[in-house]
């Protein structure tokens, strides 16, 4: 009798956990998301594209496929809560411009190359997808890991880790340094971001 | 990070600096920063570091970068690659020692095979034959070994000319400079210039590889010093984790100090639920 109860409850827990895990898998396969997005990005941001157009394309990609609000919060760290609501809003807007400006060129280096997903593992709230970019210049493949978090039915990218270097952590560290050197004022960072993006002809 | 390879060459003159910074390693963290509860940059000597960083930037702009550009434009890529393979091959004995000290015998074996094959069939290392056969070169140094042993990085330091480092990595670099068999061979035969030439070419080659990337990062950074500091520390941490084998924990979940659960743990979650249901089930029936 005890044994039967054990089996029934055990089986039902197992089934329940499978059902629970199901939506995550059917919504969209993380590996496919990255394969498609990565290769699309490598083509769209080609070297022969004008830099202005490249920034615009990257900005669109960033706002559509990345968890921009989540990333903006993360990179501001504890200063997010210190910032006023208008400051938060302005920061998110300037941050989006700044990321498009800073990273579109860096990605162009890999244009025309192929991204291959090498593995996926679960992460809190989502998945971590490992990939490598096969270089055409004979260099060893570049290792890129993507942190995906689930938002309703779609996956959004929360972080990109290149050869062990997290872009989110790097930005967070740099922004914290700028704020600290401006006497702990978030406004100092906002001003620096505005200058940088305005100098590049954005806005 | 650039000019890293110059380090063995200059180790003699810089040992004093290493001792100095080791002495400083026990200095308390910047109390103001700790009180603010801000990001921990591991950079208690930031003011001095920034000054040295600015000096390095000036030297780089006027000397190192122009030389690296000339090197890149005057030598065709296959020749530069071949030179790099040759220099990498010279690292063989030290890489083997570090692989072994880390207890990584798989990589130690790779290093031996690479060194034997490339030194002979690969014409003294000019051709990376082993790499083509599927045994790629891996970077290795004493700083990584010390990190694998659990020795903390210590304060971040910017070394004149040589660039970003930390007390652990720089001490390792200096010690390794003395242990390098080619350096010892050169010193015993009064050929110290060979050591310097090797360090110089290696440094220029490294700088040439990162010309565009570093220029782009500098152009787009709000605080270039802070960006380089973050990049250096993350990259070193990744090398110590031995990236190829272990995935890094997702960034968003490492901030509170707790490492992300490993894949194995997550995969076992449903299994654990079943096991856990066992005693409960027994209790219900009782």
Image (cartoon, coloured by chain):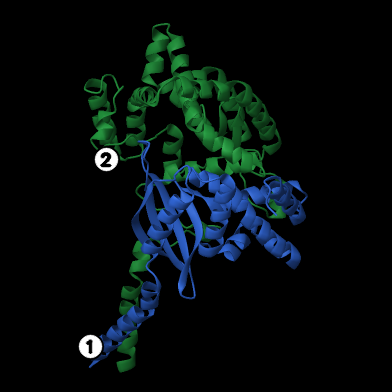
Chain colours: A blue, B green
**Of B167 and A18, which appears nearest the observer?**
A18
Answer with the quarter of the image where residue A21 lies. Answer: bottom left
**What percent of the width, then of the height, locates residue B196?**
47, 15
Which dot marks residue B266? none
Residue at image mark 1: A3
**Image mark 2: chain:** B
User: What residue lies at 68% left-to-right and 62% top-to-bottom?
Assistant: A80
Of tags 1 and 2, which is closer to the observer?
A: 2
Provide the secondary structure element on which disc 1 rests: helix
Residue A150 screen position, x and y as percent: 47, 70
Can the viewer see residue B1? no
Relative to B175, say whether B213 is above or below.
below
Looking at this view, is B207 or B161 the one in front? Answer: B207
Q: Is residue A168 left or right of residue B264?
A: right
Q: Residue at the location (34% across, 68% down)?
A: B267
**Residue at disc 2, secondary structure:** helix
Task: Assess disc 1: are there few (<14), some (14-19) or many (≥20) residues with their C-alpha within 10 Å of its C-alpha.
Answer: few
Discs 1, 2: same chain: no
User: Which residue lies at the image location 45% right of the left edge and 41% below the top edge?
Assistant: B147
Q: Is residue A162 above or below residue B8?
A: below
Tell me which residue sits at (62%, 43%) in the image.
B220
- Which numbered dot is residue B106? 2
Q: For this view, does B83 lie left or right of residue B219? A: left
The vertical placement of A149 against B254, above or below, is: below
Quadrant where the C terminus of chain B sits is: bottom left
Chain hosting mark 1: A
- Image position of B11 (left or right of A200): left
């Amino acid at each position: 009798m005890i044994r039967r109860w054990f089996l029934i409850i055990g089986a039902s827990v197992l089934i329940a956990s499978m059902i629970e895990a199901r939506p995550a898998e059917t919504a969209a396969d993380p590996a496919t998301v990255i394969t498609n997005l990565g290769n699309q990005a490598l083509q769209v941001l080609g070297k022969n594209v004008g830099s202005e157009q490249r920034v615009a394309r990257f900005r669109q990609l960033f706002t559509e496929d990345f968890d921009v609000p989540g990333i903006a919060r993360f990179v501001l760290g504890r200063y997010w809560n210190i910032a006023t609501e208008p400051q938060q809003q302005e920061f998110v807007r300037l941050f989006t411009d700044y990321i498009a400006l800073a990273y579109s060129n860096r990605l162009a280096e890999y244009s025309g190359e192929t991204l291959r997903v090498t593995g996926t593992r679960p992460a809190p709230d989502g998945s971590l997808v490992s990939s490598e970019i096969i270089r055409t210049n004979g260099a060893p493949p570049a290792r890129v890991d993507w942190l995906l978090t689930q938002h309703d039915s779609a996956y959004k990218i929360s972080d990109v880790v290149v050869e062990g270097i997290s872009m989110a952590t790097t930005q967070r560290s740099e922004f914290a340094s700028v704020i600290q050197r401006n006497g702990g004022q978030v406004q100092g960072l906002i001003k620096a971001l505005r200058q940088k993006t305005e100098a590049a002809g954005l806005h | 990070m650039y000019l890293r390879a110059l380090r063995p060459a200059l180790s003699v003159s810089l040992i004093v600096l290493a001792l100095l910074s080791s002495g400083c390693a026990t200095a308390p963290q910047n109390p103001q920063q700790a009180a603010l509860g801000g990001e921990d940059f591991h950079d208690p000597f930031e003011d001095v570091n920034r000054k040295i960083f600015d000096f390095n930037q000036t030297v780089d702009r006027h000397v190192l970068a122009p030389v690296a550009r000339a090197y890149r434009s005057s030598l065709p890529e296959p020749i530069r690659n071949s030179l790099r393979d040759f220099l990498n091959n010279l690292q063989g004995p030290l890489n083997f020692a570090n692989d072994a000290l880390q207890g990584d015998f798989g990589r130690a074996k790779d290093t031996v095979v690479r060194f034997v094959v490339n030194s002979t069939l690969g014409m003294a290392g000019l051709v990376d034959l082993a790499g083509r056969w599927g045994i790629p070169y891996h970077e290795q140094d004493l700083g990584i070994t010390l990190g694998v042993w659990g020795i903390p990085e210590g304060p971040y330091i910017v070394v004149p000319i040589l660039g970003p480092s930390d007390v652990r990595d720089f001490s390792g670099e200096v010690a390794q400079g003395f242990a390098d068999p080619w350096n010892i061979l050169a010193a015993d035969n009064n050929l110290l210039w060979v050591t310097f030439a090797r360090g110089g070419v290696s440094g220029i080659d490294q700088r040439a590889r990162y010309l565009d990337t570093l220029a782009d990062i500098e152009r787009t950074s709000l605080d270039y010093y802070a960006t380089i500091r973050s990049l250096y520390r993350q990259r070193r941490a990744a090398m110590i984790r031995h990236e190829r084998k272990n995935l890094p924990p997702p960034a968003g979940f490492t901030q509170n100090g707790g490492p992300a659960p490993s894949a194995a743990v997550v995969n076992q979650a449903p299994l654990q639920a079943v096991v856990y249901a066992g005693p409960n089930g027994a209790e219900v029936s009782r």
